[in-house]
Amino acid sequence: MRKLLHAILLGLLGAGIVHIIVLLLVPEFSERDAWSRLAMASDLYKMTRLDAEAGGAPVVKSVDPLFYAAACRFDLTDGMVRIKAPGNVPFWSVSVYDRSGHNVYSFNDHSATAGLLDSVVLTPAQMIEVRKDLPEELQGAIFVEAPIDEGMFVIRAFVPDDSWKPTVSRFLNQGSCELQDF
Amino acid sequence: MLKNALLTLLSLAIAIGGGGGSVWYALKTQDGAGAIRIGQWTAFPDIGTPAADPYSKARVAREGVLALGRAEGLSFIAERDSGGEQLMRQCAYKIDGGFPTARFWTLYAADQSLGVVQTGRPRLAALQSYQVLRQPDNSVIISVGSRPAPGNWLLTEGAGRMYFVLTFYDTPIASSIGLSDVTLPQILRVGCNA
């Protein structure tokens, strides 16, 4: 009887240890995280629509139904990446995520010059290089310093009603995600 | 000898089964570490940030969530009405009260996976603040149900569990200081189609 009790107690102690180990390993081994889902849908430096509007099931869940969204994966070891989208929409916001889906930085249209989306994501080391001689065309851009290698960003745009759908769709479809030479 | 082996097996079964099961259970429940509750509404302000707790991190990885950033907004989820009952798609509700400061907010009825409920109609089961009618004191009354209602109407249909997702965009409450004295509307059950 005492042995049984001993075994059960030991089991419970083990359960605690297993609980912690499994919890910490889930992010490492998940194949269902946002990066993996995006990787299955498209290549690096390619804008991918996240909402169902573009056809097919949504790539990443929990996007507000009144929003359209597009995402792009990038690798800062290749160089800095420039995000642009033309035109004005009622509201847009951009989030930069690291490889495991943590939000590193976010901003919205109130932060941008004239509400136009033009942004550069780069590492602190690249930032130092760029600061030395800022190119003319990057004067108005929002610089996002992110201490990451691989990452992704998501542009979200608000669709107040059906009449905005074509405009917002165009905004995202014409958005670009390019490796910026410097 | 055999008894010892059986006892060892029992210990291992409890350890692995209990450990794995408890993680699965902890990630499945909406509540959990890092949650902020205001009335019936729950938010995870830290989810998706590097400062999040291990449970939020595991949930983010498992569900492929790309959480809203601080400059974007903050989402609240309700799974029960003010009486403590689970929200059901066959029931009618009234969402009533004031909303905190934000550029705008959206409200939608969601299914288990937190996607918008499919009603099979052109009208989306979602509302946003630019289209709602307000009371003289700036509060909002929203009728939720399958029958059209005067004022603000949020369409839902079908049967089963339902969640409300209320998201504030470009809002000061997304910073942790702003959350201290926020009040959110209450959810009252009006009636159910049995």
Image: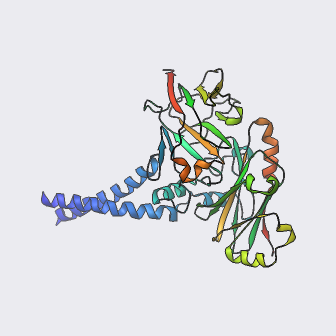
User: Is B138 in front, or is B14?
Assistant: B138
Residue B112 seen in the current view? no
Q: How far across and how far down the image is residue B29, in percent?
A: 44, 46
Is residue A115 positioned above or below B116 on the image?
A: below
Q: How far across and how far down the image is residue B179, in percent?
A: 53, 47
Q: Quadrant of residue B8?
A: bottom left
- Which residue sits at x=57%, y=63%? A100
Q: How far across and how far down the image is residue A67, in percent?
A: 70, 44
Is residue A73 positioned above or below B38 on the image?
A: below
Residue A47 seen in the current view? yes
Q: Quadrant of residue B135?
A: top right
- Which residue sits at x=51%, y=31%? B187
- Which residue sits at x=46%, y=33%? B86
Q: Seen from this angle, which residue lies furthest left?
A: A1
Q: How far across and how far down the image is residue A72, in percent?
A: 71, 60
User: Is A18 in front, or is B92?
Assistant: B92
Taking the image as shown, residue A68 lies to the left or right of residue B45, namely right
Which quadrant does the N terminus of chain B fall into? bottom left
- Which residue sits at x=79%, y=46%? A89
User: Is B25 in front, or is A144?
Assistant: A144
Taking the image as shown, residue B130 lies to the left or right of residue B81, namely right
Q: Seen from this angle, which residue lies furthest right?
A: A136
Tally of numbered discs: 0
